[in-house]
Amino acid sequence: MVGVTYDYSSRCADLLMIRKCATWLRFASTVPATVVSSRPRLHRRLLLQLKRIRASSTSDSNPKVVVTRERGKNGKLINALAKHGVNCLELPLIQHAQGPDLDRLPSILSDTAFDWIVITSPEAGSVFLEGWKAAGTPNVRVCVVGAGTASIFQEVMRSSKHSLDLAFTPSKATGKVLASELPKNGNKKCTVLYPASMKASNEIEEGLSNRGFEVMRLNTYTTVPVHHVDQMVLKQALSAPVVTVASPSSVRAWVNLISESEQWSNSVACIGETTASAAKKLGLRNVYHPTHPGIEGWVDSILEALKAHDNL
């Protein structure tokens, strides 16, 4: 369900307290004033509880941050921000769809051995693992762009230690640095399979090819804008101080949404440098991003954007 996230157990506790307060106030209205005045502390405490609950409800109805990843993939960021007392509104902007080369992936993995499999996003990792399992889990050596992408492989690494080797991560989680640092076996031919989004740039294959690698790119998935955006949720999102985006596709989808609205000048917190560059090229001004992509740096950038907004 799209909406403001909240802690379910604390909300139940609030509802219980509301019922207790209401019961006491109804009782207070039907008994002599002398009886009520004999318990003024309880009366004041109940009124304070009601004020606290109203304040909490007001805060929840005005989220500070909009999270825009595909539905079901915003939980980690929402939970990380909740630790800082930040409420979020979930507004998925994109969804993933099958790419034209997806069906080829299992057979290519079965028939061809590569020196490296290069994975540059969590979604690319998830799609690759499905094809790898369909191919019979052949031996592969994998390079991932960063910690977020590496996390996709954690579970399978525990059960397939011998056939999947997570062997390299660049010093900085960008395609450009990955292409410049991927280890090469001397002067001999070094082959790379690069399963990627149709929307991904040619930066990695060009960088690797310039270093002498033989690269096969497969467009295994793509990203498309969501078919429908709830207008009431969008209205809330437009008033939130910070919108988070995790890919250039998400930036484009957001810009398309706000193009028909009044001038929007709040902040965009990007997961990394590539997405931030896309945001700036599309005309967004208050753009924040971490030096090193990842959930912790992303949260720091979001908090920085919120602080800047509060200081205006």
Image: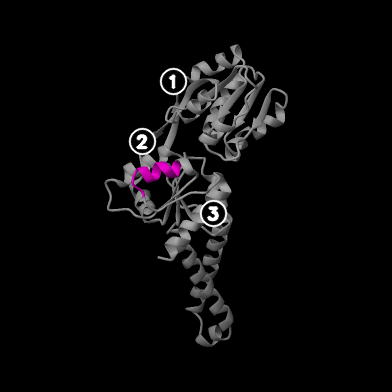
Answer with the quarter of the image where residue 214 lies.
top right
- The one nearer the camera, 296 or 168, is 168
Q: Which residue is mark 1?
A: 100
Q: Which residue is mark 3?
A: 300
**Which residue appears at 60% of the width and 14% of the height?**
110
**Disc 2 or 3, which lies upstream in sequence?**
2
* Left or right of 127 on screen, residue 202: left
Query: Is 282 inside the magenta-drawn segment?
Result: yes
Query: Tag 3, which secondary structure?
Result: helix
Q: Position of residue 164 (x, y in %)?
A: 67, 25
**Which residue appears at 49% of the width and 57% of the height?**
304
Q: Position of residue 172 (x, y in %)?
A: 57, 40
Answer with the quarter of the image where residue 94 lies.
top left
Q: How is the image coloured?
A: one colour
- The one nearer the camera, 288 or 14, is 288
**Which residue appears at 65% of the width and 22% of the height?**
185
**Disc 3 or 1, which lies upstream in sequence?**
1
CB within 8 Å, label 2 to label 3: no
Identified by mark 1, the residue type is Pro
What are the residue bounds of the magenta stretch? 275-284
Q: Which residue is mark 2?
A: 227
